[in-house]
Image (cartoon, helix red, strand yellow):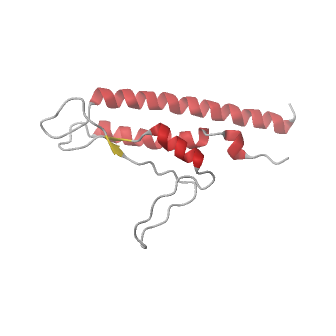
Amino acid sequence: MPISFERAFSIHDDALLLRGRRSSILAANIANADTPNYKARDIEFADMLRKAGEQQPDRIVLASTHRNHIAPQPGQLQPALMYRNPLHASLDGNTVDSHVEQTSFSENALMFQTSFTFLNRKVQGLMKALKGE
């Protein structure tokens, strides 16, 4: 019986890709906390992960509105960036709240590590099954 890696890894491989992308978005927000008129961005992780699970094996498909648009490669996750609503208005137009961004970044890093641990355990289990242990 062949092993289906999509079934074996569940959604953890997609979660790692999305968590990595979200980390870079949140890091950009933190880095631009003092940049005038910078708008904080984020992705809706749960919605993106749900869409990734629904659209297997082609993953998320981007809408192409012009014939010259470059088609995404299969397996690429392209999260929809959304602007974050600030809790407090800023005089310089910056919407980054450092405390919110740092908390989101820490939570995302923890969830990344959790998904990585689950994925690692799945691989270890498959290795033991292949060795006959």
**Residue 29 rendering spot, x and y as whole percentages:** 31, 39
- Residue at image point 20% right, 29% down: 88
Residue at position x 26%, y 40% from top?
A: 32
Residue shown at 68%/46% (left/top)?
Answer: 6
Q: How many marks?
A: 0
Q: Is residue 24 above or below residue 101?
A: below
Residue 39: name its quadrant: top left
> In the shown orientation, is residue 13 left or right of residue 28?
right
Most extreme residue toward the right is: 132
Name, please, the residue furthest toward the left: 91
Residue 84: horizontal and vertical position, in percent? 30, 38
Q: Residue furthest bottom?
A: 67
Quadrant where the C terminus is found in the figure = top right
In the rendered image, the residue lying farthest to the front is: 54
Left or right of residue 19: residue 86: left
- Left or right position of 18 against 24: right
Q: Nearer the viewer, residue 6 or 29?
A: 6
Q: Position of residue 66 (x, y in %)?
A: 40, 70
Residue drawn at x 49%, y 65% is: 71
Quadrant of the rendered structure where residue 15 is? top right
Expressed as whole percent of the image width and height from the top left, the position of residue 9 reads: 67, 40
